[in-house]
Image: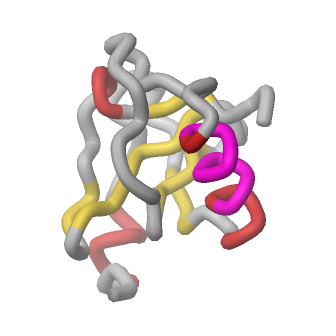
Amino acid sequence: MRLDPELLAILVCPESKQPVAMAEPELLDRLNTAAESGRVFTRAGDPVAGPVTEGLLREDGRVLYPVREGIPIMLVDESVEVSGL
């Protein structure tokens, strides 16, 4: 399920206020591979659960916010540091 373009245009990272954009499938594949091996955690320290099928990537490319059932989860604690993937 794709996000409404109007919603996407107004969303920003709650921490840095940088714009976000839909993450590319390649990044999601790397994230899910790392999560399966237990190497990826949310910024709250919890393991990333289940495959991430959609996400919003912060403009600087460091942080991803998951999208679950078409709903962007724009909480810093739920975000994932992806710069090292």
Task: Kindly indicate the quadrant of the structure image that contains residue 26.
Answer: bottom right
Query: Split into 4 quadrants, where in the image is the N terminus?
Result: bottom left
Question: In the figure, is residue 73 to the left or right of 67?
Answer: left
Tell me, yes or no, whether the highlighted magenta stretch contains residue 30. Answer: yes
Write the residue at 34% across / 19% down.
46
Q: x, y percentage for residue 2? A: 38, 86
**Residue 40 higher or lower than 43, as above or below:** below
- Identify the magenta region: 29-35
Task: Depth check: give the residue in front, 57 or 8.
Answer: 57
Q: Quadrant of residue 61?
A: top right
Question: How many numbered marks have been drawn onto this rendered protein structure?
Answer: 0
* Res 62 quadrant in image: top right
Compared across the picture, whether 34 is left or right of 14 comes to: right
Image coordinates for residue 36, horizontal then vertical, percent: 57, 43
Is 75 rendered above or below residue 50? above
In depth, the one of 39 and 70 nearer the eye is 39
In the image shown, does 35 or 67 lie closer to the viewer? 35
* Residue furthest top as drawn: 45
Query: Which colour scheme appears in the figure?
Result: secondary structure
**Magenta segment, principal secondary structure?**
helix
For this orientation, the residue located farthest to the front is: 37
Q: Residue at the spot x=45%, y=67% of the render?
A: 54
Residue at the image position 41 percent from the left and 45 percent from the top? 65
Q: Residue at x 68, y 61 (%)?
A: 29
Residue 33, percent from left and from top = 67, 49
Q: Is residue 32 magenta?
A: yes
Residue 42 lies left or right of residue 24; in this view the side is left
Q: Quadrant of the C terminus?
A: top right
